[in-house]
Image (spheres, rainbow, N blue to C red):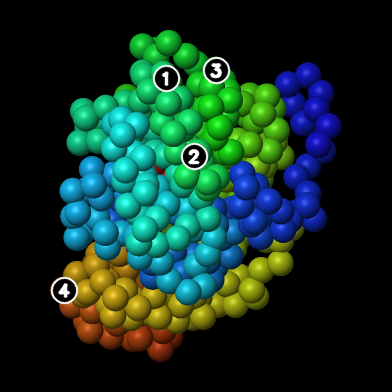
Amino acid sequence: MRWTEGRTEISFDAGSFPAKVGGVDVENPVWLAPLAGITIPPVRSFFRRLGVGLVHTEMVSCAGLVHGSRKTFSMLRTADGERPVVLQLFAADTENLLEGARTALDRSSFEALGVNMACPMPKVTRRGAGSGLLERPEIAAAMVKALVRLGLPVWVKIRKPPMTSPMDTLAFSGMLLEAGASHVCIHGRQPSQKYGGKADSSVVLGAARAFPGRIAASGDIFTPGDAKRMLDGGCSAVFVARGAFRDPFLVPEILNHCGFPVDPGNLADSPVSRMDLMISLGERILSEEGEKAAIVLLKRFLSGIFRGLYGASRFRQAVSRSSSWGEMRAALEEWKASPERGEQCDRRETFRRDRSPGG
């Protein structure tokens, strides 16, 4: 990729994939971000089916692993067909991180080890983990140096550091890479913004120019154009999070827009094939995680599926009122058979940004 003063001259080339990025072989640069309570194995497999090139686990507490928490151990499960999988860990100190990572690798295998230094939620940061590490660069670097010794690629997810940090985004990213990190993902918001306001894409693109092939973008990837702009700007990948969880079929739309082959069923004008996929996802979550998880996650995903469909209001309400998977599935099957469901309008025009938590 050629650069002029501060901007790219040529577009992203899908022909450069499959490729090895950050020490991991990937099919494409559209990756599923880690989100607590959401990126469970059925959801990860579902997004792999939609085309993402890589998935992350939920944020896994190293303290929970060290103390033998059964709930934390359950987050280490992986499933056939979802690889490559990156384990996303969080810890406040090097000792816990290293012990937690070793415990995890004794129980499962992953293509890379991820360290979360981006989460802005108080329950994580008040212990010094997540984005709390942005103000402790020496500890952050020591954590990476220690984790590299385990032999897997180490990835780090960060945010734009706060004003109180001794380093800016570029310096912090460079420090992590020098410490041994193979890849850094940058979310362009400061921790105090949480998920409000607008992500600063300029700091992400600046780091991508400084460290070619080693910086991914996170934050405000809500349309195919958003993703393409970051890839054209030199980012090695884009992490899809809130946009994709609000509208799962954003993933194949991004891939198609960027020149990657996509399953035609995922791009069909009729939404019926997409609804069949959602029902299949619900059944799998029900089987592996239980009814509550199936209802909660499908309600979230379906809000985006229904948005932009003419005549869908009544069925959207029926889904939102469902108190069991049986009720929800019946409503979806009724919607599929109803002449009122109409055709799909421009979903990108009707998309509204969801500000629910993400990394």
Structural distance between the alpha carbons of marks 3 and 2 = 23 Å
* 102 displayed left or right of 308: left
Query: According to the image, label 2 marks what residue?
Result: 149
Amino acid type of the residue tagged 3 in the rendering:
Ala
Which image quadrant is residue 359 in? top left
Residue 61 lies, in percent from the top left, at 27, 45
Q: Amino acid at mark 4?
A: Ser
Binning the other alpha carbons within 10 Å of mark 4 as few (below 14), some (14 to 19) or many (20 upward) gives: few
Residue under the image location 59 percent in, 59 percent down: 53
Label 2 sits on a secondary structure element that is loop
Across and down, in percent, residue 258 comes to 70, 53
Q: Nearer the viewer, residue 129 or 261?
A: 129
**Which mark, by number, is residue 171?**
3
Number of the label disc, if any, that sits on residue 323: 4
Type of residue at label 1? Pro
Query: Which of the two labelled residues, at mark 4 and mark 1, occupies the earlier sequence position?
Result: 1
Q: CA distance from mark 1 to mark 2?
A: 19 Å
Q: Nearer the viewer, mark 2 or mark 4?
A: 2
Question: Furthest residue to the bottom?
Answer: 337
The numbered mark at residue 137 is 1
Q: Earlier in the sequence, mark 1 or mark 2?
A: 1
Specify which label sits upstream in the sequence, 1 or 3.
1
Q: Are marks 3 and 4 in contact (CB under 8 Å)?
A: no
Crowd band around label 2 with a 10 angstrom C-alpha radius: few (<14), some (14–19), many (20+): few
User: In the rendered view, would you say 290 is above or below 155?
Assistant: below
Q: CA distance from mark 2 to mark 4?
A: 48 Å
Q: Nearer the viewer, residue 97 or 86?
A: 97
Q: Nearer the viewer, mark 1 or mark 3?
A: 1
Of the numbered discs in the image, which one, if any, rests on residue 94? none
Q: Position of residue 278 (x, y in %)?
A: 41, 75
Q: Residue at x 39, y 62 (%)?
A: 108
